[in-house]
């Protein structure tokens, strides 16, 4: 007695069928009728009946469209408009030549690095491989010393991401500073990173109002309930903007003076202003000014470049950078992270 076919075999057959369907629809200039499609795609030959083929073909059409493949339906013969045909619009299907500016390539590399410890590590690595296959040279060298501050070590991140995607309500325990954990019921709208931490936005069902939650303060398993698409996210919702509006800046804007070695510190240079150094020009180096609010955050960034970036002012920034570098060398301990 034999059991059902292995899962990997079923998936492989489906993948081959969809691939052959795409090839058939791309290789024709005129729309193909269902009969011609059935003859062209080998995996359709074994269907038990025309009705079974129709059901399989309808599912395959829906899946191709969900994948973003521009499947076009049109009348085969204008004189006899009772038969529809199918084809793929090559102009919409083909990708233009991919090209990126140096700073865009650096941003892509940094984004992929951001997700190396997160739930999207696999897709991020796949995306980089596709870009390299397309001839895009990734700018890894200019990112030496940069450690992205975005983390998704919180257990609740992945179920919340799925709930936002599917528009499903969630329930979780949430603990505010110096307070007991309370159960919250939320229709999640989005996730945003602010000062190295992840925040969840949405409609609080218990309070009947929009709320923001720090993901790291969720202290229970996140449970989704109800059907997908159960509510609508406001069209003008911007999760990052909503999070930013609820946070109070820790300080007034300040200016840091840094000395940067040529060819290094590109992320700093993009937001910096060049200034002449007080002690005269130094070969191979340039002096810049950078606006900042959080001294610890900037100190983390500067220390990440090692000897390639030197903090000159203000004093609390230079001291914070020294503490971090000393901690790395094992001479001391890095300063504790300030709680927002």
Image (spheres, helix red, strand yellow):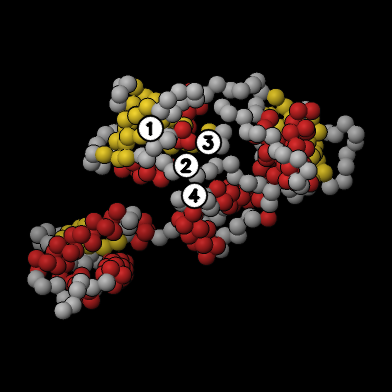
Point 37% across, 44% down: residue: 159
Q: Are marks 4 and 2 in contact (CB under 8 Å)?
A: no
Q: Are marks 4 and 1 in contact (CB under 8 Å)?
A: no
Foreground disc of the pair 2, 1: 1
Spatial CA distance of label 3 from label 1 is 18 Å
Point 62% across, 29% down: residue: 338
Point 57% across, 51% down: residue: 113
Task: Report the residue marked by disc 1.
Answer: 173
Task: Report the residue marked by disc 3.
Answer: 197
Quadrant where the N terminus is found in the figure: bottom left
Task: Report the residue marked by disc 4.
Answer: 118
Spatial CA distance of label 4 from label 1 is 22 Å
Q: Is residue 26 left or right of residue 144?
A: left
Spatial CA distance of label 4 from label 2 is 10 Å
Residue 101 horizontal/vertical position (percent):
60, 50
Callout 4 environment at 10 Å: few (<14), some (14 to 19), or many (20+)? some
Mark sitting earlier along the chain (2/1): 2
Task: Report the residue marked by disc 2.
Answer: 154
Mark sitting earlier along the chain (4/2): 4
Assign a secondary structure to mark 4. Answer: loop
- Which residue is nearer to you in this view: 229 or 154? 154
Asked whether residue 43 appears in the rendered view, the answer is yes
Q: Is residue 214 left or right of residue 257?
A: left
Residue 174 horizontal/vertical position (percent):
41, 30
């Amino acid at each position: 007695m034999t059991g059902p076919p292995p899962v990997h075999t079923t998936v492989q057959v489906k993948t081959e069928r969809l691939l052959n369907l795409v090839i058939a629809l791309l290789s024709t200039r005129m729309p193909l009728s269902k009969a011609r499609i059935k003859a062209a795609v080998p995996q359709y030959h074994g269907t038990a009946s025309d009705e079974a083929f129709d059901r399989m073909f309808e599912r395959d059409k829906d899946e191709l469209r969900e994948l973003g493949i521009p499947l076009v339906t049109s009348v085969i013969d204008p004189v006899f408009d009772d038969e529809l045909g199918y084809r793929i619009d090559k102009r919409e299907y083909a990708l233009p030549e991919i090209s990126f500016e140096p700073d865009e390539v650096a941003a892509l590399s940094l984004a992929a690095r951001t997700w190396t410890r997160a739930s999207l590590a696999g897709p991020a690595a796949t995306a980089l491989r596709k870009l390299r296959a397309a001839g895009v040279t990734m700018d890894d060298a200019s990112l030496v010393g940069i450690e992205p501050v975005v983390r998704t070590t919180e257990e609740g991140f992945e179920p919340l991401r799925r709930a936002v995607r599917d528009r499903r309500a969630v329930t979780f325990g949430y603990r505010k500073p110096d307070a007991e954990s309370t159960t919250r019921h939320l229709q999640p709208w989005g996730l945003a990173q602010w000062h190295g931490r992840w925040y969840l936005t949405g409609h609080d069902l218990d309070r009947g109002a929009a709320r923001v939650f720090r993901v790291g303060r969720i202290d229970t398993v996140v449970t989704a309930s109800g059907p997908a698409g159960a509510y609508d996210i406001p069209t003008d919702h911007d999760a990052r903007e909503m999070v930013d509006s609820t946070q109070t800046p820790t300080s007034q804007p300040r200016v840091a003076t840094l000395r940067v070695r040529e060819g290094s510190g590109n992320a700093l240079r993009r937001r910096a202003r060049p200034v002449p150094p007080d002690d005269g020009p130094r070969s191979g180096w340039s002096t810049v000014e950078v606006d900042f609010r959080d001294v610890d955050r900037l100190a983390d960034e500067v220390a990440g470049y090692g000897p390639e970036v030197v903090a000159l002012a203000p004093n609390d920034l230079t001291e914070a950078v020294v503490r971090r570098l000393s901690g790395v060398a094992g001479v001391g301990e890095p300063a504790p992270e300030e709680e927002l």
